[in-house]
Image: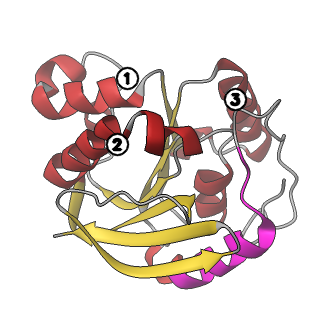
């Protein structure tokens, strides 16, 4: 795993341990960032199911203002922290550990209570400009209702009119997101990238 462009281009990242995460290939990542690069400069990035941080850190390398990483797996969190420290971008990074479904529910329904924790609102990040939504493949079949609820929370309180959501999943899986409209689709072998915005 490595950063492929921007300030830290060529820098290696610690990879995930085991098979709890599934890194995107350099070819697909380059293609993706070719598409979204005009939106990255000074952007606030949400990296959902962040793993070891490959998408958020790539965005920081390319000029994003802030990356918010959401991850529950402990081994991935440890490596994410190490990658952030190695690139010296702690001042532009925030980590929200634990169950992101629960966090978004609290942040959307009870912002005053949620801000007691380590929340995006309490740190002044504001809505996301770009959201990387990259759930483990099993979530689309095992926990689709939670993903649909997450989409509602994102659209309701965490996106502005020009925000983009990049939804990565297997081409065999389909999940229409409430309040998010798909405006572009790119397939790379068995992988699909859907580009969504608030409807």
Locate residue 2 relative to residue 113 in the image: left or right.
right
Q: Residue at x 11, y 29 (%)?
A: 109
Q: CA distance from mark 3 to mark 1?
A: 18 Å
Front-most of residues 123 and 101? 101
What residue did someone put label 3 on?
76
What residue did someone put label 1 on?
118
| Residue 1 position within the rendered picture, expressed as x and y whole percent measured from the top left | 84, 53
Q: Dot 2 lies on which element?
A: helix
Q: Dot 3 lies on which element?
A: helix
Locate residue 11 relative to residue 22 in the image: left or right.
right
Foreground disc of the pair 3, 2: 2
Q: CA distance from mark 1 to mark 2?
A: 22 Å
Q: Dot 1 lies on which element?
A: loop
| Residue 32 position within the rendered picture, expressed as x and y whole percent measured from the top left | 60, 75
Please give the label number shown on residue 32: none
| Mark found first going from the N terminus, 3 or 1 | 3
Magenta span: chief secondary structure? helix
Foreground disc of the pair 3, 1: 3
Q: Residues within 10 Å of mark 1 (few under 14, many from 20)?
A: some
Determine whether label 3 and label 1 are within 8 Å by CB.
Answer: no
Q: Is residue 108 above or below residue 29?
A: above
Which quadrant: the C terminus? bottom left
- Which quadrant of the view contains residue 137? top right
| Mark found first going from the N terminus, 1 or 2 | 1
The stretch in magenta equals: 22-35
What residue did someone put label 2 on?
147
| Residue 27 position within the rendered picture, expressed as x and y whole percent measured from the top left | 77, 75
């Amino acid at each position: 795993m490595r950063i492929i462009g921007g300030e830290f281009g060529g820098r290696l990242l610690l990879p995930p341990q085991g098979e709890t995460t599934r890194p995107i290939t350099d070819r697909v990542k380059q293609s993706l960032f070719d598409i979204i690069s005009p939106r990255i400069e000074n952007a606030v990035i949400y990296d959902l199911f962040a793993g070891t941080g490959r998408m958020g850190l790539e965005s920081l390398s390319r000029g994003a203002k802030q990356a918010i990483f959401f991850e529950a797996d402990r081994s991935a969190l440890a490596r994410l922290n190490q990658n952030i420290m190695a690139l010296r971008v702690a001042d532009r990074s925030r980590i929200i550990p634990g169950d992101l479904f629960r966090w978004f529910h609290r942040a959307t329904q009870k912002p005053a209570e949620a801000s007691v924790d380590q929340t995006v609102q309490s740190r002044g990040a504001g809505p996301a400009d770009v959201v990387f939504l990259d759930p483990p493949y099993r979530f689309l079949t095992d926990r689709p209702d939670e993903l649909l609820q997450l989409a509602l929370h994102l659209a309701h309180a965490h996106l502005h009119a020009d925000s983009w959501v990049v939804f990565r999943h297997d081409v065999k899986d389909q999940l229409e997101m409430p309040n998010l409209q798909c405006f572009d689709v790119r397939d790379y072998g068995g992988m699909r990238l859907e580009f969504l915005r608030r409807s």
